[in-house]
Structure formats: C-alpha cells, structure tokens
Amino acid sequence: MLLYRSRKPFPAFPMFGLLMAALASATLAVEIPAAAEKAHTEIWKRFVDEHGIVLDYTELDGSYPRPSPEECVQGKPNALAWWTATENGGMFNGTYMEAAILRWQITGKEEDREKVRKLAQGLLLLSSVGKTPGFIARNVATDGRTPYPMGSNDQTSPWFYGLWRYLGSEIPSAEEAAAVKARLIEVALAIEQSQWMMPCNEGAPSPTRGSFAGVGWEHAPRLLFVMKLMHELTDDAAWQQKYLAALEERNPKTQKNRLDVCRDGMLFEHEKRHSWTCASGVICLRALWEMEKDPQLKKAYHDGLVAGARLAATSLFLHKDFDPQALQKFQGDWRVLNQWWKPQHSEQDALDVAMAQVRELGKMSPRRHREFTFVREPAYAAWLITFCPDTDLVRSLQSEIMAVVNHYDYSKLYYSQFFPVEAACYRLALIQSE
C-alpha cells in the first residue's frame, strides 16, 4: 500500500459533501491500496484519450479505432455510437471525475491535479462540439470536433455531476470556475427549454433522446439534482420552487412521487443487474443528500442511498466468476459491424441497427460479456456502496468490496469499466480514517 498524508485542510465548499471533509485534518494518514494504484495506472496509460475523455475499450497495447467525421455523420456503425470505443465519454468522464479529485485531495500531487483538469476540459469539450443547445456529445471523431449525433440522459447527468464535483474542489481558478458555472447553467436552461428531453445534434435521426422528466428511478434523482444545482448556482428562488414542485409530482401508474422514488433508492428496471447504468441516478441522489438542508428531504435521500447500497451488495460476488488468467477472444474493431448498418431516420431505427449489431458482436467477442458481467457490474456495485451515508453499513462490506478490487489484473482487461474501483478505495480509506 502507498501511504499519503492529506496535503492541507480541505476547502470549505458547501457543495462538496461531508465524507470528504474527513481530509480536513492535516495529520490524517490515508492509505491507497496497491490494487487501486494499479487500476489508476492502467486507466491513464490506455483509457484517457488525447482530449481528456475516457474511452470504453482499447487493445492491451492501448490502440483502438477512432471514427472519422464522415462515419460519425453517417451514423456508422449506428447513430448512437454504441459498440465503439468512443461510446460513453460524457458518462465515464463525469463519474470518473470523483476518483480523480479524491486522489488529488489525498496525494496533493501536481500530476494528479492536472489529471482532474484534463477530465474537466474533456467534459467542457463534449458540451461545445454540437450545434444544438444542450447537446452533450459522447466523444469526437479524428478531427477532434465532430461527434456522433445522439446523446442520452446517461451521458448528460454524469456530465453535470462531474463538473459539479470539479467546482467543489479548489482546483479551478476563479476564471475557470466562472466558465464552468456558465456552461452548467447554459446546458440546464437548454434542456429545460426542451421539456427536460436530451437534445440531439443537428442531423440526428431524432431531435431528442432520453429524458429527465419521468417519475421513476431513471429520471427522478437526475431532474431533482439539476434543479437543486441550478438553485445553488444561480441563487434564483424560482429554481427552488421548481425543485419542490417536482418532488411532489406523481407517477400516474404507481402514484409515487419523486421523493418516494428517491426514498426507495436504486432499482434494476431493465436488466437483472445493471449497477453501471443505475450509477447515473445514484450519483445524483448522493449529490442531493449532500446539498439538501431540509431534514425530512435529507432523510429520504439517506434512506434511498442505504437501500441502493444493499441492492448493489448483491452484485459483489460476481467477481468470483471471472478468471483473470483466462483468455477469450476480444473484437475491438467496431467497423466489422458496418455490414449490418443501414440508414437511420428515427431513434427506433438507430436502436434497431444497434441491437442487430450487438447480437453479432456477442458471437465475435465473448470477452465483452465476460468483462461486462464479472468486472463492470461488481466494480460499479463496489463504488455505489461507498456512497451510502450509513458508514457502519459500508464498513461491514469493506472486505467484500476489497475482494472485488484485488481480484483483477487490470493490465489484461480490455474495457475501462473497472475504473469505479478507484473511487471505491478512496472513499473506503476516508471512511476508515474517521
């Protein structure tokens, strides 16, 4: 283990949460496990591109096929960018930002500070390359500016979260912080204007894709977080009123309101286990718990985080079914999927093309399923548990979390989605130091 001491008192920034205030003691010793160091090294060796954007996958030597501008515009292999190495930049940058900031707060190293800034610059790039206000790109083509035309709520909510965390650190200068704040407000206003639907870029098969507007797990914490954040950023009472009104809106089928949904916590709505997509809601729920001052609302968010941690814990065992030494074929050239490409004129067209392709990809790349099921899921689950404000519950699961972290040879993984183990380790270390 590498042993660091916190470099100086943690900045008093109200949006940055109680857990990380543990760093306020300048004599506090915080240990970073060796496995987390190995994961960190591999992420920055292979998976953060020249634009500061986290990739989905690479070959073991770090190579990957980046799409051309023409391929992005044509929607190849599909307009969603699904199955490419540049599929999830908004989601992954926004969620990995937390690990990067925590690491810098622990080490105080300039190189770690610069990594945080690089991720932030990547997030800002993703919000600047589109022609439609409010559009958050997934990544860019070989020209450094052309994106695939379709985003999603899974790209957008982590984008907000990552920049919120960045503002909550003491890393950006006053000028940089003002620019980030302005961009957050600009994007939020555009999405509100779009009735909380996620705008797509010009030329997309559909004008929007995904939403914050529903009253269910996929939507409620995201909408509430952005509204609460807007109130924090603008000090406009109108946003607080919108936030309070949104809390009370009910799902006509379940009769639950958004506060009920948040109190219930994480829910696997689409697959048997998918902590990685549910993470986009959990991070927003954690942010709400940190920002909220009303005791009753804060208690509801607390209860949701506890429930989510308990559900996430049911995925930890999956790491045991991954043999770090086993070899399975990995297909990293997404262009082979173009044989199933066809023009897409609607969101459904794009989904149909993408789903036809993934059925074939599963046959060509068995490694994909292995890493997604037995690496990605338990890695995300381990991280989500550490968001729980019931630190006794988190401590009770520490050995199981570390069993996940210590299980893998990160240099032999093709997909980047082991990165949550870093933040899990840093949060655990801070909890243990309390």
Image (tube, grey):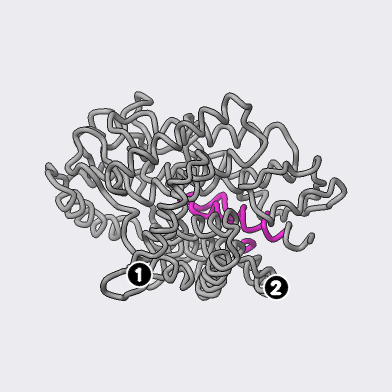
Residue labelled with disc 2? 392
- Going from N to C along the chain, the mark reached first, 1 or 2, is 1
Q: Dot 1: within a 10 Å radius of its alpha carbon, few (fewer than 14), some, or many (20 or more) residues?
A: few
Residue labelled with disc 1? 269
Q: Is residue 428 above or below residue 233?
A: below
Classify mark 2: helix, strand or loop: helix
Classify mark 1: helix, strand or loop: loop
Q: Is residue 314 above or below residue 192?
A: below
Image coords of residue 28 (percent x, y): 84, 52
Q: Is residue 161 above or below residue 367?
A: above
Asked if the residue under mark 2 is in contact with the one under mark 1, i.e. CB atoms within 8 Å, the reply is no
**What residue range appears in magenta?**
405-429
Task: Check the picture and name the quadrant holding the C terminus.
Answer: bottom right
For badge 2, the amino acid type reads Asp
Q: Magenta segment: does it hold 41?
A: no
Task: Check the picture and name the quadrant holding the N terminus.
Answer: bottom right
